[in-house]
Amino acid sequence: MNPDKVKELLFSAGYPKWRCEQTEKAVYSGGFSSFSQIKVLPSEIRELLDSKLAVLSFEPVKVFSSQKGDSHKAALKLKDKRIIETALLYRDLRRWSVCLSTQAGCPVRCSFCYSGKEGLKRNLSWEEIADQALFWKSYLKDNNLGEIQSVVYMGMGEPFLNYENTAASIKVINDKLGIGKRHISISTCGHIPGIRRFAKDFPQINLAISLHSARNEERDKLVPMNVRYPLEQLSKAVRDYIDSAKRKVFIEYIMIAGLNDKSSDAGKLAEWIKNTHENKYFTVNLIAYNETGKSYKASPVEKMQNFQKLLLIRGIEATIRKSLGSEIKGACGQLALEK
Ligand code: SF4
């Protein structure tokens, strides 16, 4: 929902400001798919709003749920008929993490990722991004499943290539949906101008870097943006970010068998971190590769554990991320632009 459009419509029909605030509050509390369901509003306002505006800027087409019910993926049809995806993943104690998409498709075309397979179709508006969180809030409420604990920008698209809309959506998610800044994370594949801007604009929001390799020759293939912003430049940008934001950075590392999971790769990663800043500013999240139609294979668990151990020995916090959503193709790198 775009609150400005609600205001414009209600003001032009002569309604007072508090009616706009009442509408906004009701919508962002979740659980409404149309204005007609908001019974605290007089029927003439409900009809007026429904005749001109929609609660969500897209039409939810289908929700896919894992057998255990700990991950869900939604296909959402945009106004231009494109279908994007967003995911909801269980954390603990009835609390969930929402994974948002910022672009329809992705221009970066990382080799392990399904989202970039067809390139970029278009940027999503801030409303389309924020509404994904609103959609999941309502979904959780309608199904009595709990609440959103965190929001991660790790779905389709590179958030910093759609900076303005990403930034505007963060504000809505924080101000209107009430998700605390420290519970919001942005993941970038290393867009340096975006990192620098983000450090100034959102020092309290978490930053994650999708690194996946600490060797330029390999990262050029895995994350093609590395050709433009190689590891040395990325290291400097991350160092400056830490110096200004005084925040920890999360390093995302998808582990692909035989490609980036060797002991020497762990050593390289530790070296990149050491050259960037003190170890205490980093947490490495090791993620098993999820099937995306490539010839890649996920690293075996023992390899991942060994990699983790090598980082821990060097004093770097490292976790093996529990993989959720692969069963419904809603895990890391699997969200796609559907026809
Ligand atoms: S990993 Fe992220 S940046 Fe790379 S293609 Fe997928 S969505 Fe785009």
Image: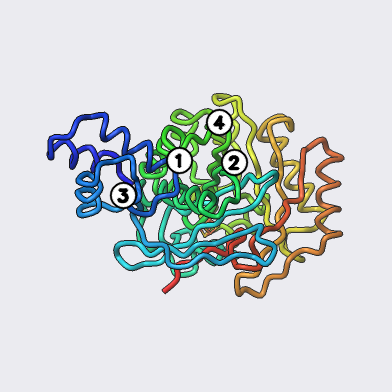
Residue 312 in picture, x, y percent from top left: 83, 41
- Give the camera-side residue of 224 and 247: 247
Q: Is residue 76 left or right of residue 63?
A: left
Name which of mark 4 and mark 1 comes first in the sequence. Answer: 1
The answer to whether the residue labelled 2 contacts the one labelled 4, judged by CB atoms less than 8 Å apart, is no
- Disc 1 packing (10 Å; few <14; some 14–19; many ≥20): some
Circles 1 and 3, Cβ within 8 Å, touching? The answer is: no
Of 147 and 231, nearer the camera is: 147
In the structure shown, which secondary structural element does the residue marked by tag 1 occupy? helix
Indicate yes or no: mark 1 CB to ligand 1 under 8 Å.
no
Q: Is residue 268 visible?
A: yes
Residue 214 pos. (x, y %): 68, 49
As measured in the structure, the alpha-carbon distance from the residue carrying label 1 to the one carrying label 2 is 25 Å
Disc 3 versus disc 4: nearer the observer: 3
- Give the percent coordinates (x, y) of residue 77: 38, 65
Q: Which mark is residue 35?
A: 3
Element marked by disc 3: helix
Marks 4 and 1, how far apart at CA: 11 Å
In which quadrant will I find the C terminus?
A: bottom left
Pointer 2 local density, CA inside 10 Å: few below 14, some 14–19, many at least 20: some
Mark 1 = which residue? 194
The numbered disc on residue 149 is 2
